[in-house]
Image: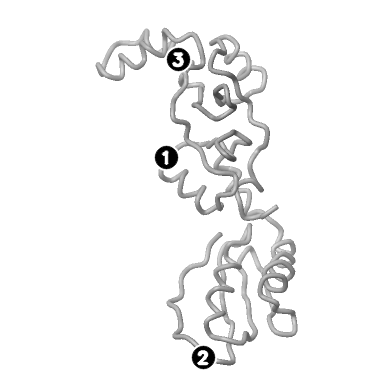
């Protein structure tokens, strides 16, 4: 598994219901499993929408004093809903299982939600919460270093410890050594920055041959 993708940190096997699931069935799922939302799938198993606690609580809020006409009409429709198809919010806010953690973070920032359903080929395979992304940065420095040295440097760039050395401290990676061509320096740094748990990269790589102009340094983050 690619440790820098959504699939590596999501909670698998999300709770889903069909379009015809009743209000009570959905409420029971949320109450007994202590979850804040369920996915709604169509006949083909694709994610059609999401029913959240907010959708169910419309049954209470509709009794409050009317303030905004449009919002009131929406609340009224939710309050009268009896099935998942009527209750759900669609389309569902989601990310793909193979999306990078950076893409997922951007999606959270864009939508402002606390969780996203994860899909693969349109079908729900997990749920990703904000705290799942934050927990990534608690990864042990030794694990990060091992992945960089063995998976990134050796397997992907054929760079052994005789050519490149790695230091990881509090998630900050310092990489020193020498590669063959100047054009390799920035790609190596960017790839290290994609490793799960990396906070930043201090790329100090040197080179033998100047085959390309230096790239402008950027902050490498996962």
- Where residue 2 sits in the image (x, y, percent)? 67, 55
The residue to which callout 1 is attached is 111
**Which mark is first along the chain, 3 or 1?**
3
- Where residue 101 sits in the image (x, y, percent)? 56, 52
Viewer-nearest of discs 2 and 1: 2
**Which mark is first along the chain, 1 or 2?**
1
Identified at 46% across, 45% down, the residue is 107
**Mark 1: secondary structure:** helix
Identified at 56% across, 92% down, the residue is 209
The residue to which callout 3 is attached is 86
Distance between the alpha carbons at the discs numbered 3 and 2: 63 Å
**Mark 2: secondary structure:** loop
Total numbered labels placed on residues in the image: 3
Distance between the alpha carbons at the discs numbered 1 and 3: 22 Å
The residue to which callout 2 is attached is 210
Viewer-nearest of discs 1 and 3: 3
């Amino acid at each position: 598994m690619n440790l820098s993708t959504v699939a590596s940190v999501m909670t698998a096997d999300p709770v889903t219901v069909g379009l015809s699931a009743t209000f009570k069935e959905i409420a029971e799922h949320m109450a007994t499993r202590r979850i804040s939302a369920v996915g709604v799938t169509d006949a083909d198993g694709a994610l059609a929408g999401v029913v959240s606690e907010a959708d169910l609580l419309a049954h209470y809020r509709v009794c409050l004093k009317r303030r905004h006409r449009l919002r009131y009409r929406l609340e009224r429709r939710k309050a009268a809903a009896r099935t998942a198809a009527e209750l759900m919010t669609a389309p569902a806010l989601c990310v793909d299982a193979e999306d990078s953690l950076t893409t997922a973070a951007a999606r959270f920032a864009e939508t402002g939600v606390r969780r996203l359903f994860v899909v693969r080929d349109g079908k729900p395979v997990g749920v990703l919460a904000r705290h799942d992304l934050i927990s990534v940065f608690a990864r042990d420095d030794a694990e990060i270093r091992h992945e960089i040295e063995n998976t990134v440097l050796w397997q992907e760039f054929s760079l052994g410890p005789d050519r490149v050395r790695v230091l990881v401290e509090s998630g900050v990676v310092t990489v020193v050594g020498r590669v063959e061509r100047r054009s390799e320096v920035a790609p190596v740094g960017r790839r290290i920055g994609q490793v799960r748990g990396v906070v930043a990269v201090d790329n100090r790589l040197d080179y033998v041959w100047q085959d390309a102009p230096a790239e402008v340094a950027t902050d490498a983050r996962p």
